[in-house]
Image: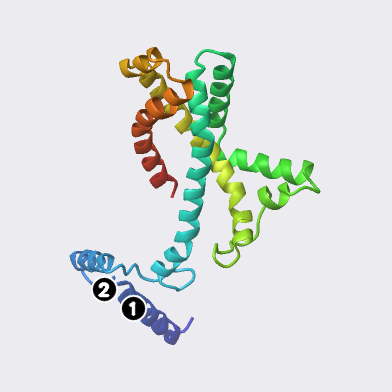
Amino acid sequence: FSAGDAARADECVEIARQELGLDKSVPEQYVSFIWDLVRLDLGDSFKTKEPVVDEITSRAWPSIELGLLQIAVALTIALPIGVISAIRQDTWIDYLLRFLSIGLLGIPVFVMAILVIMLTTRYAEGTFLPDWLGPQGDYVGLFDDPVENLKSMTGPALVGGMGTGAIIMRFLRSQMLEVLRQDYVRTAWAKGLRERVIVTRHALKNALIPVLTLIGILTGAIV
């Protein structure tokens, strides 16, 4: 290790300090950081040497798409199950659906994902399930190939949506039970309206108001 090598090393260190802004005082570094943050300049990645904003942008749409699909799956599961469980309170159907929701809440998402992959690849060979629920390759954009995009998204959306759907289902059930005890619902029953009309037009509309707030919170957390 010669003196020339040491000089070059010191020069490289000094260049790196200037590039990272470490040659400035701490207050100057902080102001510079905040100003770059306002301008959405997050610097370059240490690994890829590409701008961090570009790295985030390239991953943003897959994350948003998966989050929206997960919420769609959750609502498809939660809305009918929550309503049925509420209007059939304390029956065997209610107990079964509540047991199912507790089971989905208790199983971590990563464990559910492994189980789905194992079952579909081992026991569903020769069907469409391994292609749609099994392990997938690289992400394909929705507008590049919609079918391949849905294949890569269906499994994760179902696995994540089941746990999220269980949360929404239990919350919707409690809201439905509260609404069904209200006076205006009893008046609707007294008028002789059909059960479907009472549930969909009177109870469900009002029960969904706090549920929509929960859905908004879950959507942000998922994305």
Q: Which residue in the structure is indicated by mark 1? A: 14
Spot the residue most to the bottom. 4
Spot the residue most to the right. 126
Q: Indicate the quadrant where residue 199 lies.
A: top left
Please, is residue 86 above or below residue 49 in the view?
above
Please, is residue 93 above or below residue 52 in the view?
above
Residue 170 at x, y = what percent?
46, 26
* Residue drawn at point x = 44 percent, y = 73 percent: 50
Q: Which residue in the structure is indicated by mark 2? A: 23
**Mark 1 surroundings within 10 Å by alpha-carbon count, few (fewer than 14), some (14 through 19), many (20 or more):** some
Q: CA distance from mark 2 to mark 1?
A: 8 Å
> Which three-letter amino acid code belongs to the residue tagged 1?
Glu
Residue 82 at x, y = what percent?
49, 27
Label 2–label 1 contact, CB within 8 A: yes
Q: Indicate the quadrant where residue 109 lies.
A: top right
Residue 134, numbered label: none
Residue 65 at x, y = what percent?
49, 55
Q: In the displayed structure, does residue 94 sit left or right of residue 38?
A: right
